[in-house]
Image: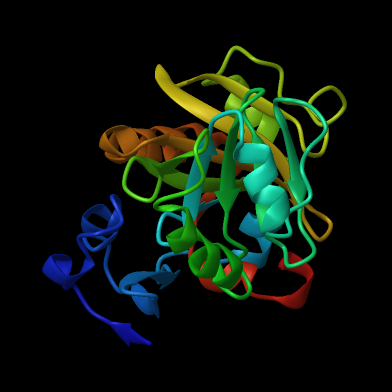
Amino acid sequence: MTTQNATASLSRPPLNALHAERPGVEWMPLGDARTPARFADTSDEAHHLAHCGLIDLSALPRFGLRGPQAAATLTEHGYRLPEAPNRCLIQDDATRLARLSATEYLLLGSFADTDRHVSETAPAWTTPAPGCYPLPRQDSHAWLALTGADGAAVMAKLCGVDLDAEVFRQGHIAQTSVARTDAIVIRDALGDTPCLHLLADSASAAYLWPALLDAMQEFDGGPLGLDALLAPAAA
């Protein structure tokens, strides 16, 4: 792990240039990219994780499939499918499989092993069976995680959908607008910690990240690095 301001080498994930502007960021390698492991100006990581934290997961793998044979292809690769659209199911290896429509799926790599299952299986889908089309999401969508009990209250300032855990339950998906940016929002949990995943167009990430941080100020929230998710309970 190193502390550096090396924007040129951190250009692949869409927010790394923005993160590199912060003082004292600790970076960690992740595949062929790097991601913030810790933000030096975040004073209480445990508090932010439990109450209001924002993590950039854009260096983790994500991949999509669409078509009438997408479900069969995923099943052949050992994935368990959500029963209905707009639902997400955590797999045995902590990969998240989101069903966005009757024939479209999104895979999100796990935090602990940084996506091994997705990385190993995605290349096989570059030329999948007829009726199944790959949707590379690594470059098209940024991936953020809003953690903590105040996450729904933060989102209420930016999104018209009620994301309170009482109505927007574990595994539910909303395809909606967040801060006037189209986004996929997924209700998850990191052990006992509530979490909302947000996937939005990479070109909008540099706008969405500060908009979320601004909305979090009322709740004493702040940014977190990937280290905050690497405890066993967060896998």
How is the model colour-coded?
A: rainbow
Q: Residue 76: x and y, percent? A: 70, 55
The number of callouts visible is 0
Q: Is residue 51 visible?
A: no
Q: Is residue 19 left or right of residue 63?
A: left
Q: Residue 149: x and y, percent? A: 75, 43
Q: Is residue 85 left or right of residue 107?
A: right
Q: Give the residue displayed 24% in from the left and 53% down from the top.
A: 18
Residue at the extreme left of the image, as rendered: 8
Q: Is residue 195 left or right of residue 5?
A: right
Q: Residue 214: x and y, percent? A: 43, 35
Q: Residue 33 or 68: which is nearer the viewer?
A: 68
Q: Give the residue displayed 49% in from the left and 67% down from the top.
A: 119
Q: Residue 72 or 103: which is nearer the viewer?
A: 72
Q: Give the residue displayed 68% in from the left and 29% down from the top.
A: 173
Q: Is residue 36 visible?
A: yes
State the image quarter where residue 141 is shown.
Answer: top left
Quadrant (top left/top right/bottom left/bottom right) for the C terminus: bottom right
State the image quarter where residue 37 is shown.
Answer: bottom left
Would you place residue 161 above or below residue 126 in this image?
A: above
Q: Residue 13 or 63: which is nearer the viewer?
A: 63
State the image quarter where residue 89 is shown.
Answer: top right
Residue at the extreme front of the image, as rendered: 130
Q: Is residue 9 left or right of residue 75?
A: left
Q: Residue 66: x and y, percent? A: 52, 33
Residue at the extreme top of the image, as rendered: 160
Would you place residue 74 above or below residue 99 in this image?
A: below
Quadrant (top left/top right/bottom left/bottom right) for the N terminus: bottom left
